[in-house]
Image: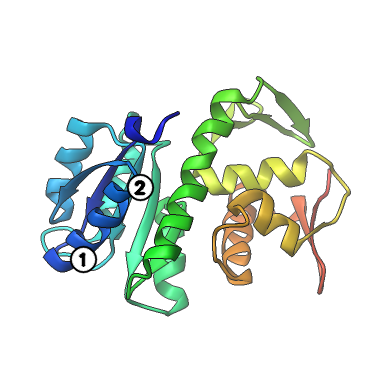
Amino acid sequence: MRKNDICILLVDDEPDIIEIIRYNLTAEGYKVATAENGLKALKAAKKHNPHLIILDVMMPEMDGIETCIQMRKDPDLADTLITFLTARGEDYSQMAGFDAGADDYITKPIKPKVLISKVKALLRRLNDDSTRRSEVITAGNLEINREEYKVTRGEDLISLPRKEFELLYLLASQPGRVFQRDEILERVWGNEVVVGGRTIDVHIRKLREKIGDESIQTIKGVGYKFVE
């Protein structure tokens, strides 16, 4: 997919932030739409059908967390890439964002090189998805359909945000194999994305809540493995 075919929706209530990010993204060749709060973001997302949404956490009318939750309820936006902008460094903001269905986060103040790297790493997955062959794997009592981004247990559908799905698919693709943390970060988040080990822990915790504690085993000081 060419850059000038990609639309990014930028949502922030600070005009200076909007201008800085829009300038850097358009300089890279992306189309950029903007909104100044969560309510307007929902309308803009419907109108522009963006490939990626960059969403501020602290906003009037409707904050970023609630906006993300509402977007994930919309079938047309359920798989849209979403990354948060947050001035907070606390684990709470990151965990709340992932719980809401975000794929990543970017910390303010904005560093243009980091911003572009994260955007490229996220959008690279669009090309990966378009060229990936259809594949369904069965791991334990789970059926994981990568083409449809769907996980089922018997008749039950387990809803997972994209990053949780990618993490589960990676671990379940080779049951019993221990995946080291560095490998997980590179293969799920991409080597251009600057994230910490806490990011993996948050996603593992959410996966265990949805598929069961017994399915993913922690190998202390090394990484994780899927147990059938």
Residue 149 located left or right of residue 99: right
Image coordinates for residue 46, horizontal then vertical, percent: 21, 33
Dot 2: what SS?
Answer: loop
- Quadrant of the rendered structure where residue 3 is? top left
The amino acid beneath tag 2 is Glu
The amino acid beneath tag 1 is Ile
Using a 10 Å C-alpha cutoff, classify the residue at mark 2 as few (fewer than 14 neighbours), some (14 to 19) or many (20 or more).
few
Q: Which residue is mark 2?
A: 28
Dot 1: what SS?
Answer: helix
User: Is tag 2's residue or tag 1's residue first in the polypeptide sequence?
Assistant: 1
Query: Is any part of residue 93 visible from this angle?
Result: yes
Q: In which quadrant will I find the N terminus?
A: top left
Residue that appears at 42% across and 53% down: 102
Using a 10 Å C-alpha cutoff, classify the residue at mark 1 as few (fewer than 14 neighbours), some (14 to 19) or many (20 or more).
some
Residue 8 located left or right of residue 167: left
Residue that appears at 69% across and 23% down: 135
Name the residue at the front extreme. 27
Q: In which quadrant will I find the C terminus?
A: top right
Q: How far separated are the C-alphas under marks 2 and 1? A: 17 Å
Residue 132 located left or right of residue 70: right
Q: Which residue is mark 1?
A: 17
Residue 101 located left or right of residue 17: right
Residue that appears at 38% across and 70% down: 111
User: Relative to residue 150, is residue 10 depicted above or below?
Assistant: below
Query: Is any part of residue 149 visible from this angle?
Result: no
Q: Nearer the viewer, residue 167 or 50?
A: 50
- Quadrant of the rendered structure where residue 13 is? bottom left
Residue that appears at 59% across and 70% down: 196
Name the residue at the right extreme. 176
